[in-house]
Amino acid sequence: MPSKITSRDAIYHDDIKENNTQKTDRVFEDVIVGPDLNSSRTPLDKKNYRHIIIKKNGLRVILISDTLAMSQHQYMHDDEYETDEEDNCVDENMDVFDEVDHDNEDNDDDSQSEEEHDGIRTAAAAMVVGAGSYHDPPQAQGMAHFLEHMLFMGTKKYPKENAYDSFLSRNGGNDNAYTELEYTLYHLEICQEKFFEALDMLSQFFIEPLLLDDAVERELNSIESEFQLSKNSDECRQQQVLCHTHKDMNGSKRQQSIGDHPFGKFSWGNLKSLKEVPKENGIDMMSELRKFFNQHYFAQNMRLVVIGAFSLDELERQVVNKFADIPSLPRVEIEDGPFQPQYTKAWEQKYCSSIVRNHGLPLSKDSLGSIYYIIPVKEKHTLTITWQIPPQWENWKSKPCDYISHLLGHEASGSLLSSLKEKSWVNTCYAGIGDGGHENASTHSLFSLTLILSDKGVLHWEDIVSEVYIYIGMLKDYCKSESGLPQWIYEELKATQEMSYRFEDEMMSVDLVEEIAESVAPHKNLPPEHVLDGESLIFNFDGNLIRELLDDYLQPQNARVDLMSSSFGRAADKTNEVLTPMDDAKVFPLSVGKPNIEPMFGTQFWSFKISLNVMKRWNDVAKAQQPPSGSSIKLPPKNPFVPSRFDLKATSPEDTHHPLLHASLKICLRVGKQKSWFPASVLTYDGTRNKVLLSYEDEEKKWHILDNKILASDALPYNFEGTLDNKTIKFKVVALAKEGDGAILKYGDNSDWHVEDGIHFPPIPPALPKSRLPLLVCNDKLLKIWHLHDLKFKRPTAELRLNIICAKANKTPVQRACADLFAVLCSDALTETCYMASICKLGNSITSTDVGFSLRVHGFDDKLLDLTESILSVFFSFRKNKNDLPDFIKPSRFDACLEIVRRKYGNTGMQSSSLCSDIRLRCIRPSIFSAQSKLDSLVNLRLEVFTHIIQDLLDEISIQMLHHGNIDRKSTQLAENVVRKASNGIKMIAKNKYPSQRVLVIPQQKIKPVIVPTIDTSEPNTAVEFYIQVGKDEVRHRVLIDLLVQLLYEPLYDQLRTKEQFGYHVSCGARWTNGVMGMCFNVVTSCKSAVSFRITL
């Protein structure tokens, strides 16, 4: 290590040493330090972590020192740590610097981080509070959500209502919060310089908020507006029906009272639950609000996560200083606290709320064993089987539900989905425990299987459920066999999770703190040493837990079935008070009557006990046994896409990685009899000769021998010093380049970057060298290929993008509709192959575009071309069959995919916001056809017409390809061969035959507004978009628009959303439309008119 480093460097390196030697319960003056987290981080994660408890109040905090951001932050603030060495150049032969110490080569913290997000890395924080909708008072449901809103309305220290939001916005930051069933999370993001000020403002939320009466009405209206945005969401409506009927199948026992299971509460909150109901019951809402805050918002019930460009010691000092005044325990006496008193402020402390102690599983016997027929808003058919099982947090090591959901939701040959698709009953399925609080709570877990049905499948819902239990019976049979469940399935699942975790992309700072905060929410009780990897990895296999879940819980009598289908009607059908039964009694009992109505969303549903005969049939097939003869159900095959190679492709000699590459240096050279410091930049590193090519201020370039032994993996400290040319020249690092970027043009001291307010602009890097830009390696009429070997992210992943341009694309609505159908049909035919690949983190997409089709394949590069070959083989196979489908696609799948596309068009624009955006685009892009016009064109579409249109589309094409990632030129050549082989024999088109992508110029005169009614008559919201067209895309336009958005966003939000109460959704942003820049203002409101918005704006 260097013989002399600055005080800042000493802090930096102490952190690294400290984090590799810290022991559990190491006690500082103000904190108790917990288990080392650095051992569980991913190999590519170079941040430093520390887990502490603040001794004064018991608040648990995870501190994250962003070492890469520290590098950025430090060279923007040299003056704080500058030494006097500039004026004292040493003699040529003086040993000015020791060699870098490589004795501790296995220390990950010494390695150079080799990836980051573009631009300056921000600081972020997230506070999670162990109080959510579960804790709402029965007569004020939505209270936790209401309090979340009210905390933003000012604190005693910062009383101005929008002080917090305004401060963050002025300093390039943002914030948000959300309420879950058992916790509420608040997070912020801001520039490093203002981080500690922002933390202080956040801390006051939990120390002394104002909770003023005059903000109540406005925030209640905001919550109502937020509810109205979700009111027509079928997913939200179905979830609320589940809550509404948890006690009995009709919801007649819906009224919540003290002692009822909190699962039945209305978690969103609205004016009815937070204003009308409390008023009817004589409840003072502000008194209840302050009581809720005093009961639940205390330090031991909170967890804080912070990340910044500061040492762990500095982060710790600031956090203790700002958050230690949060009361340790509730501000009022409570009878039944969530913590064990003997472990107060200790790592052994376990959270156990009164909810867990007083309540078991939420779904009653009356609610189970029933079928619920639900009327949706959209045209859709979904069948959901829900089993309630014990809470699964304590099974974090083995994750048995991951194993079961992996098999039940599998899509390869032999899977449940494959069997049901053969019968044309089901198109898609999803299995497992959801991420939300309703599905994964401390009182229970809900394991569900959701199947997207065809029209035909609705008629066979009982048979579909039978197939599900046949599959479960097969799994039980394996459990009871001598060999048990196949170990290789667990090993495969474990391996894919491990490789995904090992090479996961680095998150933005705010996403990272939010994710970790969710993991450490008090009710989860995740061991402190596993807060980074505990929810991501499987640590062991427990066949007994899997068998117990299958035998005891995944049974017909422990399940409820929800069938949501537009066959029963739709929410907008106001006259449909009494359902007209379908002809087939399998779908609906013959005697129906009026539907039940869920009171908050107004969802109509019917509920019936499943007949004893049907239950007996399901129980019989659910017994431990192999599937009956003739069934295609079996365990999945071994996955051919599991990667076995994770090595990185070698870089070219002229672009070898080195810590000094592209760094800015100060060089001490003799000029006459004097020595002076001169600026220089490292252009190239020659690994074979250990030389660096320097570019000086006068543009002279010169090679120098690097004396110091520096490995490519070394993390150099800021102000690193060394020597060149056998110690005749001394150098000092001024700025280290970000990995993947070009040379840093920072030669002067910090004074070069002073601005009036004392904030320093970062140095502006030069343009990237050609080796870091996509290289055009092929350019003919058929193929135009760009190749880019990634030298920035250093992961064994790659991406292949194909833009397939069709000469005859997008001419008519029916042509575009057939292109959409073709993309869906290809994806459907590839389901079994692509699902196997997706398990191994190999993703893909096929979509139609204005000019043809877009294909994307991305993930681990080892098997990427294998998947690409399979996709292209299916895609181009449609050229070979005149008036018919390829042999491997059954006609029944054509009908099923046609039904999917028709349903998609029919559901387009159901929300006012999406309809508004669609109309704006159609006003300026004449090549866009409306969903209705495409839907109309598919009426009576015959198979031979479809195949003729697709063959015509694929008759003349040109392909643009980008191959990027951990690939060399040989890899791109192999990719080219795959594409050429698949497209062999196709006619090539010239560029002048490419389809038009015009954008109309908006005339510079007064324009009449475009006003249209909502498609869904039950939609409660009005959406308004105000669009300003700027001009053709150029850097200046982009920068100015981004600057305007940054300046306008917070005052627009404060004026329209907070003060004038237009609605919950208020925003502005840049728009890029086929090379034309613009700016858009958006408002979605349920209480104001479009005219009001225009006048205000």
Image (cartoon, grey):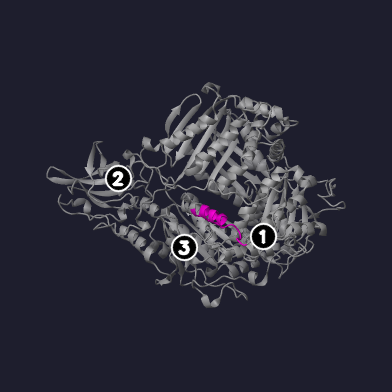
Residue at point 82% right, 50% down?
586
Instruction: Identify the element where label 1 is drawn.
Output: helix
- Contact between marks 3 and 2 (CB within 8 A): the answer is no
Q: CA distance from mark 2 to mark 1?
A: 65 Å
Residue at point 49% right, 40% down?
799
Q: Which residue is mark 1?
A: 476
Sequence-first tag of 2 and 1: 1
Work out whether residue 338 or residue 644 is closer to the camera in this orientation and state it.
644
Sequence-first tag of 3 and 2: 3
Instruction: Identify the element where label 3 is drawn.
Output: strand
Q: Quadrant of residue 792?
A: top left
Where residue 819 appears, as percent x and y from the top left, is 64, 32
Q: Which residue is mark 2?
A: 664
Where residue 850 appears, as percent x and y from the top left, is 59, 30
Sequence-first tag of 1 and 3: 3
- Contact between marks 1 and 3 (CB within 8 A): the answer is no
Q: CA distance from mark 1 to mark 3?
A: 42 Å
- Contact between marks 2 and 1 (CB within 8 A): the answer is no
Residue 1058 left/right relative to 751: right
Instruction: Identify the element where label 2 is drawn.
Output: strand
The kind of residue on which mark 1 rests is: Lys
Q: Which mark is residue 62?
A: 3
